Amino acid sequence: MHEELLKERVDPKQAALIVVDVQNDFVHPEGAIGKRALDTTMSMNMIPRLQKLIDGAHAAGVPVIFIRTEHGKWTNSKSWVIRKGNVAGPPICQVGTWGCEYYKVSPDVDDFVVIKHRYSAFQDTDLDLVLRSIGVESILCTGVATNVCVESTARQGYMLDYNVVFVEDCCGTTTKEEHEATLLNINLHFGIVATCDHVLKVWGVI
């Protein structure tokens, strides 16, 4: 990776840290994803690094924006509900449930929270307005799942002309293959891939 390029992209004057969907239903083994017999180990294991990155962002003066998925009768369209066919499984991130709550990381008083109802954090939310209002040009993408909501957010962010930094060891999904496929795709077409420590070193907080 080109050191100067990363330094430019994560400059606290124009970058924001995006934390996507770190919620019980996606990460906790007793959440909806775990109950569907999918492996949440990668997502659980990256949490200490993610917390380290969040703390580093706060120390460096980088805005932190938490993305939170909520589903319910007002936003569950027919096409959304049956997108995978009629595969049975527990509902995910229903409003007001334990599964919708954050898993081990949560926003500080000065962090911003965006509620979303689809994969991308930009889809029909105020995320783009918030980022442009505070002068953000680069987004650091983290959270779960690497290949679904984090990748969807990164892709749409790129289409909206944000520089994308994908923090590979602060993301998680259910298989190594899906995780690595996203990293390859992001690096080839949508942005740059970095590690937590690499970013923190550029910020001068480790």
Image: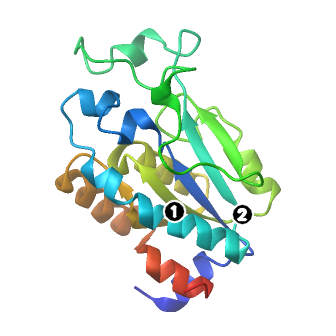
Task: Tell me: 103 left or right of 67.
Answer: left
How far is the residue under mark 1 from the one under mark 2? 21 Å
Residue 128 % position (x, y): 69, 47
Q: Which residue is pictured at 58% across the width and 35% down the height? A: 123
Quadrant in the picture for the N terminus: bottom left
**Which residue type does callout 2 highlight?**
Val
Residue furthest to the right: 133
Q: Nearer the viewer, mark 1 or mark 2?
A: 1
Quadrant in the picture for the C terminus: bottom right
Q: Which residue is pictured at 47% across the width and 62% down the height? A: 50
Residue 124 % position (x, y): 63, 31
Q: Quadrant of residue 148?
A: top left
Q: Which residue is pictured at 51% across the width and 69% down the height? A: 52
Q: Quadrant of residue 81?
A: top left
Q: Which residue is pictured at 22% across the width and 15% down the height? A: 87
**Which residue type does callout 1 highlight?**
Gln
Task: Tell me: 168 left or right of 34.
Answer: right
Q: Secondary structure at mark 1?
A: helix
Residue 17 % position (x, y): 60, 61
Write down the residue under mark 1: 51
Task: Tell me: 49 left or right of 177.
Answer: right
Tell me if residue 190 comes above or below residue 65 in the rendering: below
Kindly identify which numbered label has been placed on residue 136: 2
